[in-house]
Amino acid sequence: GAGVSQSPSNKVTEKGKDVELRCDPISGHTALYWYRQSLGQGLEFLIYFQGNSAPDKSGLPSDRFSAERTGGSVSTLTIQRTQQEDSAVYLCASSLSPSGQAFSYNSPLHFGNGTRLTVT
Amino acid sequence: RKEVEQDPGPFNVPEGATVAFNCTYSNSASQSFFWYRQDCRKEPKLLMSVYSSGNEDGRFTAQLNRASQYISLLIRDSKLSDSATYLCVVSVTGTASKLTFGTGTRLQVTL
């Protein structure tokens, strides 16, 4: 399909291990976001990529979290030395951002199905 | 105070009922407002944007009250398929990275 694709859909890992989550945005979408959602909680912003601009990392909860976006397309979110509190659904979203505008009404976020991360 | 607050519900309503949700936001510089819908264990999907003058899409009506800093969503003639969590989303000064999601209001429509 043409939607946002995330992998893996589920990941169980032991505390202290590193994990890598992947997001393949919709083709042509220049904006890419990572959020996480814990059970019964709202979406927590993690990081935002827009074209070739420096990413907004203001939502990353600690230096164990990092993300890259290669070639303006696929993004990976890496969590090092995972902790139990990292358990959540990690959602990636992309949007079509018109030139010169960071956001507009005509650029809704399209979310992937998420990666459910469980740290044991 | 949270940036975006919603009543978590659940709102249990019979089919055919009219139900309304409010969402309050704390930052008066907020410029863009949206309602997203999230089904259980699914990703959020845009339901509708909220325009200053209010807007309607079929059975759904969204309104913005800047003076009181809240937005509302009205659902008329509720269907079983409307059962979901409705997320209020607010953006400050149209900056994409500053989208703030509420925790959602859960709606359960029953027979």
Image (cartoon, coloured by chain):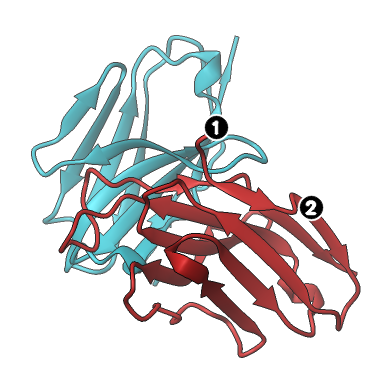
- State the SS at label 2: strand
Amino acid under label 2? Asn
- Mark 2 surroundings within 10 Å by alpha-carbon count, few (fewer than 14), some (14 through 19), many (20 or more): some
For the residue marked with disc 1, what is the amino acid?
A: Ala
Q: Are marks 2 and 1 on the same chain?
A: no
**Residue A111 located left or right of residue A66:** left
Q: Quadrant of residue B66?
A: bottom left
- The residue at the point 40 percent across, 58 percent down is B5
Q: Which residue is mark 2?
A: A10
User: Can you tell which chain is drawn red?
Assistant: A
Q: Where is residue A94 drawn, in percent x and y? A: 43, 53
Colour for chain B in the figure: cyan
Q: As drawn, is B67 to the left or to the right of B94?
A: left
Q: Which residue is mark 1?
A: B84
Q: CA distance from mark 2 to mark 1?
A: 23 Å
Residue B2 visible in the shown view: no
Say above or below: B81 vs A4: above
Q: Residue furthest front?
A: A71
**Quadrant for the N terminus of chain B in the image:** bottom left
Q: Name the residue located 17 percent from the left edge and 55 percent from the top edge.
A: B68
Q: Quadrant of the C terminus of chain B?
A: top right
Picture coordinates of residue B9, whole percent (x, y): 53, 41
Q: Quadrant of residue A21?
A: bottom right
Indicate whether B50 appears above or below A80: above
Q: Give how far across and how far down residue B31 sits, in percent.
A: 17, 59
- Residue toward you, B25 or A77: A77
Residue placed at 11% from the left, 56% from the top? B67
Residue placed at 86% from the left, 83% from the top?
Answer: A16
